[in-house]
Amino acid sequence: MNPKIRLSSPHMGGTEQHYIKEAFDTNWIAPPGPNVTGFENDLRKYLNEAVHVACLSSGTAAIHLALVQLGVGLNDEVICQSMTFSASANPIKYQGATPVFVDSEKETWNMCPVHLESAIKDRIKKGTKPKAIIVVHLYGMPAKIDEIQAISKDYNIPLVEDAAEALGSTYKGRKCGTFGDFSILSFNGNKIITTSGVVPWYVTQRIKRITPSFWLPKPVDHAPHYEHSQVGYNYRMSNISAGIGRGQMEVLDKHVNLRRKMNAFYKTLFKDIEGVTVLEESNTEVFSNHWLSCILINERAPFTERSAL
Ligand SMILES: *Cc1c(COP(=O)(O)O)cnc(C)c1O
């Protein structure tokens, strides 16, 4: 039997243990600790110094907090890319809201701007203006961000960028994870690097203020201890996970290069096979980390040449 090839197992770079040992040596195990601050700074340096970054326990938690911050609540509607992992949509339900799914275009396999606009128009006509748009860079392939940002601006609907699979991808030279009012990254076991989740955001006109009580279970109301005026979520990343994250940042570029090599390998492999197309960058303005290489199969194409594999 052929050995199983795992989808995307974690690969430690080597320095992770140094950061973990430091956490043990200084007894900084639980949040927040110096590794969390360090990881947040590493990510800001990598993404863009102008963003703010909070390390959380998962990408799902990051999407949830973004929706909470945007005031998504009971009976609201949130637009979500239909072709994605379920975690893009689950937090909409956590808030008692309803997802409105928008189909993809063929070039990047991500949310189609034309369908997005007609969905918004339709919902507005029916009296339920969506509270947010969740766009995804599926498989690491950047979505049509210019068009989607323009629609988000025109209709004044905040954009949540699910860049869970796209750390290391860029759009017109700018890093994915910096395009949303809130953006989210995931460091789950199967992602390009591994540890937990992260939410970067800009302080834009729409996001005037972020309430730290949402992830820090401590009072921010100038109230005495243990009095809170808002419900909070204990979603912070532990200092141990953040230590792994810091070590992983040192091998991120290497991981991206390897994934891109795999994609080039598949392109060559399937080049002469009729009916098989590998998902690839459609122009030089997008750069995909190729977290996952995907193919389209035309079932109607003759498959005689498949034996060439
Ligand atoms: C993995 C993933 C998430 C969720 O991230 P977790 O850290 O696993 O919670 C969200 N969206 C997409 C597209 C993902 O691939």
Image (cartoon, grey):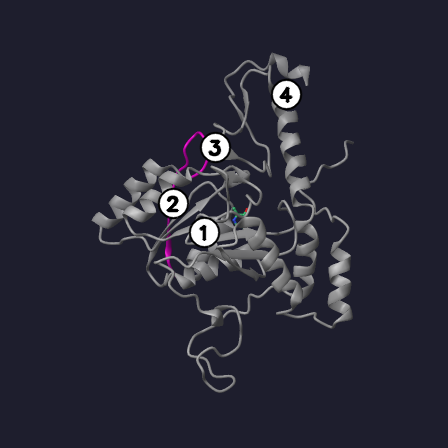
Q: Position of residue 92 (x, y in %)?
A: 42, 56
Secondary structure under tag 4 reads helix
> Which numbered disc covers residue 101?
2
Distance from disc 1 to disc 2, alpha carbons, whole Å, reads 9 Å
The amino acid type found where label 2 is placed reads Phe
Main SS of residues in magenta? loop
Residue bearing mark 4: 268
Q: What's the residue at 60%, 18% (across, down)?
A: 271
Distance from disc 4 to disc 1, alpha carbons, whole Å, reads 35 Å
Q: What's the residue at 46%, 33% (across, down)?
A: 108
Q: Position of residue 275 (x, y in %)?
A: 53, 18
Camera-side residue of 44 and 74: 44
Secondary structure under tag 3 reads loop
The nearer-to-camera label among 3 and 1 is 3
The nearer-to-camera label among 3 and 4 is 3
The nearer-to-camera label among 2 and 3 is 3
Secondary structure under tag 2 reads strand
Q: Tag 1 or tag 3, which sits nearer the N-term?
A: 1
Q: What's the residue at 22%, 53% (across, down)?
A: 127
Relative side of 79 to 250, left or right: left
Distance from disc 2 to disc 3, alpha carbons, whole Å, reads 27 Å
Q: What range is drawn magenta here?
A: 95-110
Camera-side residue of 69 and 275: 69
Residue bearing mark 1: 89
User: Is the residue marked by circle 3 packed among few (<14), some (14-19), or many (20+) residues within 10 Å?
Assistant: few
> Which numbered disc covers residue 285?
3
Relative side of 201 to 71, left or right: right
User: Is the residue marked by circle 2 packed among few (<14), some (14-19), or many (20+) residues within 10 Å?
Assistant: some
Q: Tag 4 or tag 2, which sits nearer the N-term?
A: 2
Q: What's the residue at 73%, 67% (across, down)?
A: 23
